Amino acid sequence: MKLVPASPWDYITATSKDGVTRFDARKTWEAGAFLVSTWAFIQLTLTNNLTEVFLGAYMVTWVGARFLRDREQRLNAKPG
């Protein structure tokens, strides 16, 4: 499993089974949401307003998103 993308474009593009790289709207929305929520997390931390609710929501959102994406990839994988 590749942990670090080869290019920053890997965060918003996907490569199809025939090797064609294309724009991926799901990955783009996910990257944008991650940037916005991380900015809010940092801002709340710096202003000493970070609550357990926001911290929990932040963690559940990103762990949940990763779990669902991995589950989708497992379900769509061809056996064998």
Image (cartoon, rainbow, N blue to C red):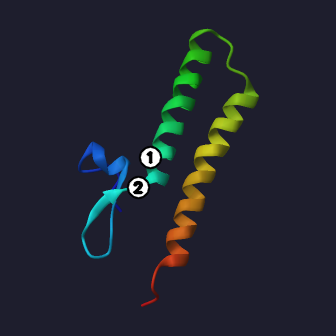
- Quarter of the image containing the N terminus? bottom left
Q: Secondary structure at mark 2?
A: loop
Q: Is residue 41 left or right of residue 8?
A: right
Image disc number at residue 28: 1
Residue 60 occupies quadrant? top right
Q: Residues within 10 Å of mark 2 (few under 14, many from 20)?
A: some
**Whether residue 38 is situated above or below residue 50 in the rendered picture:** below
Image disc number at residue 39: none
Residue pictured at 53% horizontal, 30% vertical: 36
Type of the residue with mark 2: Asp
**Whether residue 35 is situated above or below residue 5 in the rendered picture:** above
Type of the residue with mark 1: Thr
**Whether residue 18 is situated above or below residue 15 in the rendered picture:** below
Indicate the position of residue 39 as horizontal and vertical percent values.
52, 24
Residue pictured at 37% horizontal, 47% vertical: 11
Image disc number at residue 24: 2
Residue pictured at 60% horizontal, 60% vertical: 68
Indicate the position of residue 19 as horizontal and vertical percent values.
24, 70
Cα gap from disc 2 to disc 1, whole angstroms: 6 Å
Marks 2/1 in contact by CB < 8 Å: the verdict is: yes
